Amino acid sequence: MCAASAAPKQWLQHEYHKVPVTAVAFLTREIILAGEGRTLIAYAWESGRRLWSCRVFKSQSIHGILVCGSNLVVWGGCLLRAIEVGFSNLESIACEPRDIIRIDDWVLDATHLSDLSGILLITAHNALLHYSWEQMSSGQRLSGSHACESLVAGSNCILYSAHVKQLSDSLYLIASGTAFGDIVLWSHDRETEVSKIHHTFPAHEGSIFDVRISHFVCLPDDESRRRLLLASCSDDRTIKVWDVSDLNTESPSLANVHQETGFGQKTLAASYSPPCLGQAMAHLSRVWKVRFLDDTPLSGSTGRSHGRHGELQDVLRLRSFGEDATTLEWLLSPSADGSFELHQLSACRPHTGKNIWSAALGPGLVATGAADGSIAIIPDVGHPRAESETASAVGSVELGGADIRSYVFADHDILIGTDTQGQICEIGLSEASPPNATVSSHIDPVPELRGYSITASKAGVTFIGNSRGQVYAYLRLQQKLVKVAEETKKVTGLFASAYGMISLLVTIVGSGIATLLHCGQEESGGFTFADKASLPMPANRIVTSFVHVLLAHQTLAVVGTRDGSIVVFQVKSERTEGMPQCNGSAVRPKLIKNVHHGEAVTSLSYKLNSDDTRDVIIHLYSTGRDGTFAAHRLSGDGEDLTLETVHQLSTPITANVEGHAITDGGHALVWGFKRDTFVSYDLVLQREVMTVKCGGLHRNWAFQLENEGGALVWTKASQVFQTRQRDLPWQAINHSGHGREIKCVAITETVPQLIATGAEDTDIKLLTYSSDALTCLHTLRKHNTGIQDLKWSRSGHYLFSSGGFEEFYVWRTSHGVPGVGVGVVCESRHPRSGASDLRIMGFDLAEDSAGSSEFTIDMCYSDSSLRRWSCRSGQWQLVGEGSYLTSCLTHALHGGGTLLTAASDGCLASWENEATGDLRWAHRHHVHQNAILAAAQCAFRDGLTMVISGSDDNAIGLTMCHVGEKHSFGSTLIPRAHAAAVTAIAVVERLDEDAFTFVSAGIDQKIRVWRVTRDTGDGGVNALRVERIATATTAVADVSSISMVKLSDGGHGFLICGVGMDMWRLELECGLQA
């Protein structure tokens, strides 16, 4: 029996969502408005704090926001709503929405009248509508009465974009972009009620996704002439700028010009095209939006820029926003022959995944909203500047014609370098913009440093090695050079470490022994060092990094090698007035092989949990040219010394990670080179901090980390360049979401709960939920295809993920890792990962014992096969396999002591083990007419198991399964449970032994809560009573999965995933009282 009832109390309460940002607008310079699904949210963008939110529509997403003084107009689809906003400061903001207005067509663009008495709308069929409010200009409250007037009737063309621009009190110019690459430019005079079509022309080879009309501008070829420009962007990845100044021309209508539909040769229409001033191939994929950054050409002291040949020229800037999640800045400037060209000035990728859906311009700011649910605020510097101008060269003139051989930072704005003539130089970096440098020398050239030298620096002391084996220390403040060591051969490596004191590791050519020095400065300014210790390196290991760990009763020298290994030496030492004295020997090294997968270990650092006990735990951090950042737990001593990797994940730099730092705020930052670009990345905030195009890794370079940026110096074409960043390139709000559709979600049962989401972008994200926000901890990058399924072990220590190409990975988590919080390591990779194009559609696992690392995993494959694997401490063994007809298996469930599967033929099947160990389906039960897309189970005390299933047939199936000597199945359907496919189901909680609640969601974006009660007198499905007790609408499109969440106050919640994430609270007490 199935019934619908209305609950007297609120079952469902919306908590939080992260969905694509489909509209943005600046309310003030400090406040950004964002349309997130059906909700309008105001943020103080500098802090990222949410100020207020307003549910504008019942289910329709917001597509546009227009600010009209103290009023807002919000539209989505064919709905329109006015909102009155009042505020005196950021802490006191109030909004009052008015009645929703339904229009006959979709709204594409709107603009307000100059007197703010109303707005003009352009629709998807090129109709112009006027919408006015009574008494708006007098500042009184909105009355709710309105007048909606159709000024120009629509046509039979289908528009993908439009822009309406007011040219005078009565004249409006409209640009319309069609689905077939045409632009219609027309005007309407409200005073004379005359409409004219000025241009109708084929503009692009693809659909036109945005058009934008500029203000009147003056261009250099005729500075006395005021012009109108039109920018357009398209499916063909180009942006174009057109001169549409001549509004005296009239063009035939689109219907008269076109004798064909779709794309193709349009010679007649092309004759009505305005002049194209410039065009450029813009993005890697479709271009969604384009905006003019300047209302007038930049001229005089603020608007002229230097061209490539040094001449002054007037310019106009644009920004484009693309499917590739990047925004590009363009310069429209004259070329030598008098024509115009579009040049790319800069590129910025403030979002992950794909699709910047919305953009807005503010005073000196550009805002973007994207599919990853984040908002980026990008400062607009207000004047064009080519990338080559952001770095300045330290030329050979200042160095007397000699070239700088090597250099290193000795302070945040001071580099110490050596040139080919043996001169030691101090290079001072300035705070100017663009930056410049001063070069000075305070000591005479050192003949021993001519031709070859290498440098390293720590704590203000710069070490310099030469080809003769000599090592010097340069004391900058004392302007003094001291020889600290003399080896027998050429010095090939200097590695400095400063934790309490300065240590130096020296390697020489052809030797397998590294030399360790302890160095220090006396209060008088003198320089001292202890006797050196020899560290015998394992065979064929070349040192690439080093850190010195100082403990109370021992010191450790940790060395990274070129083959990706880490070597730990215990150096015998005694402390003398705070300085350890080496006795020249070291305990046999502990070699940990292949930590960075055969690639060089580029940097090492550490943190202690205590500095005064023998039982100390050391967290060692490393980066490598395998593109990973790792944390290791180093414990024990002597022969019992162990190193356990507790965190190791790939970074977005992908390869050539060259350094890292753990900031005072606990953030782990890494930096390195991604192709020809230097990148600094914050692993905690999951965002780029600094990017500089410098040519790539293979050059001399030095980097000094600073707050929100740093200073980079590099050599290119025998010159030394520098650039400095003190502010983040953009401010992010709600960052670190998936940029593609989320396919699955899994949440641990342990506290604190970890949320794992897997998406089509091949990433897995680990998140936590607290304080009404989802916070991304890590992004797991290992899969090469979209994620199909995720599961946690009961202990929450292991996460399992499956995808296409038979990819299957096991991830191990560790809590309390300094610098990263939760450590994650890829514990195991399935041996057949990447072996074929089969997808592992779903899987279920059984733990051999609680908290163990031994699992039995049943995997469903897209070729209808089922395989059972045993995973024991990373070792895999095939236990059994079987095949199910010709339909694709979609889910595996361990229920009632047996294995159940769901398939694309709408059937459930139970499986048995044969004597040979293989699997055979024993019973097949038909439930749905179409594929089963969602399945969950609930066990009863009498041994029966209920499987709740959702399907393409829009129904929910309740199947009672009894598996024993004789398999028996019985089903009842809830037909039309949703208006579209049911794609997600989760069991909430057992109210008692014979009742439970579950949640369903589907493509119709509806959430429904159901209560199932079973009559214990009858074990069949006829004894079930099903009630639909709550319904709500989610902003998440293409819902794929649901998982239950334990909220921070102990309440029950669930997370819905699809194109975004949506958190809801479920009040079970309502059902108990109903």
Image: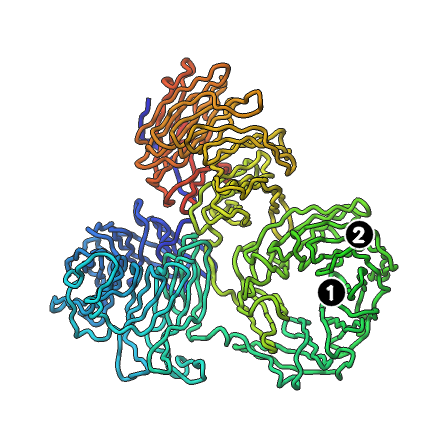
Q: Is residue 358 above or below residue 888?
A: below
Q: Which residue is drawn at 45% across and 36% down?
A: 862
How are the residues colored?
rainbow
Q: Mark 2 touching mark 1, by CB under 8 A? A: no
Q: Residue at x 43, y 39 (%)?
A: 1041
- Image x and y of residue 323, in percent: 39, 57
Displayed quadrant of residue 453:
bottom right
Image side of residue 871 versus residue 861, left or right: right
The C terminus appears in which quarter of the rendering?
Answer: top left
Q: Which residue lies furthest to the top in this view?
A: 1017
Look at the numbered disc 1 and give the secondary structure of its residue.
strand
Could you tell me the amino acid type at mark 2?
Pro
Q: In this view, does 228 lie above or below 209?
A: below
Of 659 and 707, nearer the camera is 659
- Image x and y of residue 97, in percent: 29, 52
Q: Is residue 227 above or below residue 502?
A: below
Could you tell me the amino acid type at mark 1?
Ala
For label 2, the residue is 589
For label 1, the residue is 496
Of 649 and 1065, nearer the camera is 649
Of 301 and 631, nearer the camera is 631
- How packed mark 2 is, by other alpha carbons closer than 10 Å (few <14, some 14-19, many 20 or more), is many
- How packed mark 1 is, by other alpha carbons closer than 10 Å (few <14, some 14-19, many 20 or more), is many
Image side of residue 1032 versus residue 166, left or right: right
Q: Residue furthest right?
A: 583
The N terminus appears in which quarter of the rendering?
Answer: top left
- The residues bearing labels 2 and 1 have C-alpha atoms spaced at a distance of 20 Å
Displayed quadrant of residue 173:
bottom left
Look at the numbered disc 2 and give the secondary structure of its residue.
loop
